[in-house]
Image (cartoon, helix red, strand yellow):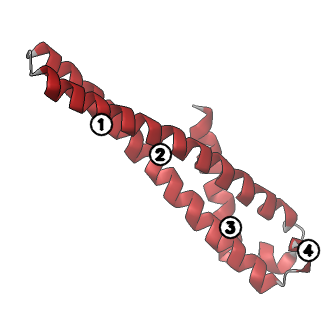
Amino acid sequence: RASTMSAEDAVKAIRIKTGSLRRLFKERAMYAEEVTSGEAKVAAMKRENADDGDIKQQENVLEESAMMVQDNATRLHDALGSLQVTVEHFESDAMVEASEEYAAAVVLLKEVEDALRK
């Protein structure tokens, strides 16, 4: 399928996949921060002997945030794999490889891969 793409279509696909991966990568940090702040809020509420109902409600919010982290991790992994395959497929296409979109994709792939190793 990809081999019959024009260079223009390939660059467009790379731009779209790069945008998706960039968005998911930013969401990853946001959701992780939500979990961290939610854990702190629950701990503070327990220390302050807050109402059990309020604590339970905050724990539910925290649980939802944790589920979003998992969902994001799956979607991030899928987007990363998709962009990797596309970039690898076109790495020998001089017109595609010379594009700003291709260069941006390579930089983002390295950034995401490095972050996921930590």
**Residue at disc 2, secondary structure:** helix
**Residue at disc 4, secondary structure:** helix
Residue indicated by mark 1: 61
Crowding around mark 3 (Cα neighbors within 10 Å: few <14, some 14 to 19, many 20+) is some
Q: CA distance from mark 4 to mark 3?
A: 20 Å
Looking at the rendered structure, the kind of residue marked 1 is: Val
Looking at the rendered structure, the kind of residue marked 4 is: Ser
**What label sits on residue 98 in the rendered view?**
none
Number of numbered discs: 4
Mark sitting earlier along the chain (4/1): 4
Q: CA distance from mark 2 to mark 1?
A: 17 Å
Q: Residue at x 37, y 32 (%)?
A: 63
**What label sits on residue 28 in the rendered view?**
2
Crowding around mark 2 (Cα neighbors within 10 Å: few <14, some 14 to 19, many 20+) is some
Q: CA distance from mark 4 to mark 1?
A: 46 Å
Mark sitting earlier along the chain (2/4): 4
Looking at the rendered structure, the kind of residue marked 2 is: Arg
Q: Residue at x 15, y 20 (%)?
A: 52
Q: Is the C-beta separation of discs 3 and 1 under 8 Å? A: no
- Nearer the observer: mark 3 or 1; the answer is 1
Mark sitting earlier along the chain (3/2): 2
Residue 77 horizontal side relative to residue 47, left or right: right
- Nearer the observer: mark 2 or 1; the answer is 1
- Nearer the observer: mark 4 or 1; the answer is 1
> x%, y% of residue 62?
32, 33
Q: CA distance from mark 3 to mark 2?
A: 23 Å
Q: Is residue 15 above or below residue 50?
A: below
Q: Residue 47's quadrant in the figure? A: top left
> x%, y% of residue 42?
22, 24
Residue indicated by mark 4: 3
